[in-house]
Image (cartoon, grey):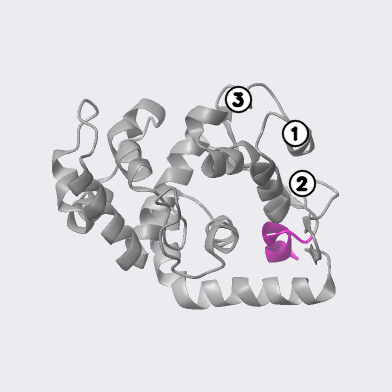
Amino acid sequence: MGKYTKISIKVPDVNRSFVSNNYKYSNTNVIKENNSLLDNIVKNYSKFMNTWGEEFEIDNSIISGFIATESGGKNVPPNKFKATGLMQVTPDAVWETIVKWDNFVEVPLSDKSIKFFNKSIPSSKKFNSKTPPSSAVKNEILGALENNSEFNIAIGTAILRWLLEAFKENNIANINKVMVSYNAGYYAMRNKVKGVITTAELIDKKNIPKESRGYLLKMLGVNGFLDLWFK
């Protein structure tokens, strides 16, 4: 029996596919390209996904789906929000996850996780919820996110787990709400996804950013990354 909440996932979760201009996930060539992308992610990063997926009890299919959706499997540079790397994590998200973990997750971070995070970002030893990270600390975190693929995957997977715990209902963690929150931000989304909401309802909610609604289709729709994984 695992130590974390069981994840609820069914693919495809909605009978629609992601479409953007001429790009359509159900296109034969796109399906082929996306399957190849998932294969390459597993080939290049399975060691890290296995290690941290096991630590936070998240299946490789979910981790690889987030990597594919966030970065296309490339170690991309920071965007305007300072999100960077394979899982497009921001320095603020790293700090917040570490200092607020106990607010959302009943299971404390393991010694293994703490030691790895401290090694990757030495300043994390002094993190506390009352002192936001300085510019210097944010730059240290950003450097680790950019240059350490294992750290990017490890902290990205940790973020997924605390969001899964934050959005659990009846002791089931709802992956669709986590996807919206990972993309748009927990505090921006927490009141907009309350209650029992299906993925289709989330996609149709106009107060959720269009990009986040597309995010759901990219993973949970017909021929989305998670659907392709299980086919």
Tag 1 near tag 2, CB within 8 Å = yes
Q: Is residue 140 visible?
A: yes
Mark 3, Cα crowd under 10 Å, few <14 / some 14-19 / many 20+, is few
Mark 2, Cα crowd under 10 Å, few <14 / some 14-19 / many 20+, is many
Nearer to us in this view, 90 or 167: 90
In the picture of the structure, the residue carrying the numbered disc 1 is 198
Task: Inspect the magenta stretch and tell me whether residue 23 lies in it.
Answer: no
Q: Name the dominant secondary structure of the magenta segment.
A: helix
Mark toward the viewer: 3 or 2: 2
Q: Earlier in the sequence, mark 3 or mark 2?
A: 2
SS of the residue at dot 2? Answer: loop
Nearer to us in this view, 22 or 44: 22
The amino acid beneath tag 2 is Asp
Residue sitting at x 58%, y 21%:
191
Q: Which residues are magenta?
A: 223-231
Task: Inspect the magenta stretch and tell me whether residue 225 lies in it.
Answer: yes
CA distance separating discs 1 and 2: 9 Å
Q: Residue furthest front?
A: 80
Q: Earlier in the sequence, mark 1 or mark 2?
A: 2
Q: Earlier in the sequence, mark 3 or mark 1?
A: 3
In the picture of the structure, the residue carrying the numbered disc 3 is 170
In the picture of the structure, the residue carrying the numbered disc 2 is 13
At which x and y percent is residue 215? 66, 49
Mark toward the viewer: 3 or 1: 1
